[in-house]
Image (cartoon, rainbow, N blue to C red):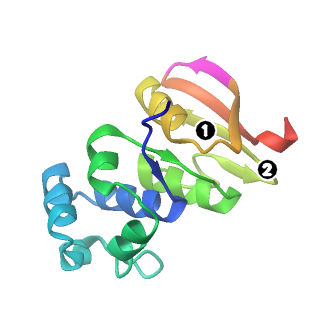
Amino acid sequence: MSTEIKLSQSTAIRLEQARGKGMSEADILKAIQAKDVAAFDSVSEEHYRYDTFFSYADEHGENLEGALQNGYRITFNTRGGLGIWLEKAFNLQADKDFTVGEGIITGLQLTAEQAEVLEQRLAWNWVITDNIEVPAGRELTLKLRALV
């Protein structure tokens, strides 16, 4: 029986965006507990706003507080969405820090700790096929499960 908290890709991107833009865990938690959309105004972006953050989470049974405090797994990753999540979660840039291809992401270098977070968050439809030790940590290749 799994007690793993699951989040949609969209919700996960917004959560990591808030973290990546410097919102403290305490401030994110406070905003989640109060369902305060305005608290995210300073970290909102044109394509990643928080207008429906709480209503979507409520409608889909997403435990935002638990995800923030205990981690989560993304329910499904698209190729583009996974690239965006990697950018937000680890402050990386596609085509500079990793390459997104058809059903594959290559050249992704993460610290050992970041690689562990990725393993915990990665949706079931993607797998880590290569995990090579490099001076900075790990170099990973991710593939769509259907292509392995």
Give the left or right position of residue 16, taking residue 136 as reference: left
Q: Which mark is residue 70?
A: none
Q: Nearer the viewer, mark 2 or mark 1?
A: 2
Q: Position of residue 132 (x, y in %)?
A: 64, 20
Name above or below for residue 7 compared with residue 56: above
Q: Is residue 91 visible?
A: no
- Give the residue at x 65% y 41%: 124
Q: Circle 2 is placed at which residue position?
A: 103
Residue located at (49% from left, 50% from top)? 92
- Read off the magenta span: 131-135
The rendered magenta stretch, by its main secondary structure, is classed as strand
User: Where, by quadrant of the figure, is residue 28 drawn?
Assistant: bottom left
* Residue 59, placed above or below residue 25: below
Secondary-structure class at tag 1: strand
Give the SS element for disc 2: loop
From where the camera sits, is residue 81 visible? yes
Residue farthest to the front, as pictured: 1
The image quadrant where one finds the C terminus is top right
Question: What residue is drawn where x is 18% and y is 73%?
Answer: 39
Residue with the mark numbered 1: 108
Q: Position of residue 121 (x, y in %)?
A: 50, 41
Q: Is residue 47 left or right of residue 58?
A: right
Residue at mark 2 to residue at mark 1: CA–CA distance = 14 Å
Say whether residue 128 is magenta: no
Question: Crowding near pointer 2: few (<14 within 10 Å), some, many (20+)?
Answer: some
**Residue 40 occupies which quadrant of the picture?**
bottom left
Q: Identify which residue, 56 or 18, lies in the foreground.
A: 56
- Which amino acid is tagged 1? Leu
